[in-house]
Image: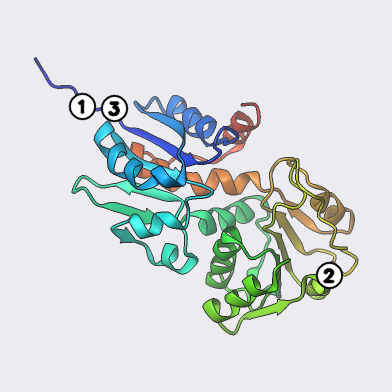
Amino acid sequence: MTELPRIPLAGVIGSPIAHSRSPALHGYWLKRYGLKGFYIPMDIAQADLAEALRTLPKLGFVGINVTIPHKEAILGMADIITDRAALIGAANTLIFRKDGRIHADNTDGAGFIANIRQNAPQWNPAAGPAAVFGAGGAARAVVAALIEVGVPEIRIANRSRPRADVFRSDFGAKIAVYEWTQAANMLEGAATVVNTTSLGMTGKPDFRVPLDALERGALVTDLVYTPLRTQFLIEAEAAGATIVDGLGMLLHQAAPGFERWFGRRPEVDDATRQAVLSA
């Protein structure tokens, strides 16, 4: 009897995980390209994380996405860590190699930039400072990416000032830290504005920083994509900004992992976007 190849399995781990749109996204790509494989959401508690990483490869998993609350802890369990994952201090994509080692990467920053370039191709990162609201893991990925593409100055405000201060020591002289109460001042002269907080997300408090100082023609993007058009984006557009919603970042950050796990680079296009929105 001929031994059949194992069907590759991938998935996303986190807790909670039922809200994730990643299964719909990867499932769409698998069907679109006629590939064998499955992508499975798995709610794994922090206490079970190490055991899960040992077990999943034995079950046929070739890799996983990682989301809250495991993105930082996972680095301590990986054998190979990319430079960008180390700089960001978190991983969102794992590859289970055939030699048994776990390869950890972070594609959030690349997905963030790809989303802007796709939806605002006229964007020039060197045009002026960037204003970033928030100083969590997502903000670290965004800041690292903005520095890499040549943004000259990055202004950061966070509700907890000490978390923002860490950015200055980790990312260097391009970082300017603002008090949250003075966050609106970051917008003066800013060419790029990013909300990395959960403010404005469905079920979360509103984003209340006034946008009066927002430059007309600035690029404004929100990592929140539920709702797709946040109040932050609506007000920015009304003030004359070019806006980009956060869904594209989810789509683009997923593409490198899909390629490594299933062997084909997927397209991120309108059909992909609609498939995820309608899931």
Tell me the CA gap for discs 1 and 2. Answer: 57 Å
Which amino acid lies under the numbered mark 1 shown in the image of this protein?
Pro
Rendering quarter of residue 257: top left
Q: Is residue 187 above or below residue 269?
A: below
Looking at the rendering, in which quadrant would you find the C terminus? top right
Identity, as a three-letter code, of the amino acid under mark 2 = Ala
Q: Amino acid at mark 3?
A: Ile
Q: Residue at x 74, y 69 (%)?
A: 191
Q: Which mark is residue 7?
A: 3
Q: Secondary structure at mark 1?
A: loop
Residue 238 visible in the picture: yes
**Residue picked out by circle 2:** 184
Q: Is the Cβ of the residue at disc 1 closer than 8 Å to that at disc 2?
A: no
Front in this rendered view, residue 186 or 267: 186
Residue lying farthest to the left in this orientation: 1
Observer-side mark, 1 or 2, equals: 2
Bin the neighbour count of mark 3 within 10 Å (Cα to Cα): few under 14, some 14-19, many 20 and up: few
Residue that numbered label 1 is attached to = 5
Along the viewing direction, whichever of 186 and 47 lies nearer the viewer: 47
Residue 90 on image: x %, y %: 47, 59
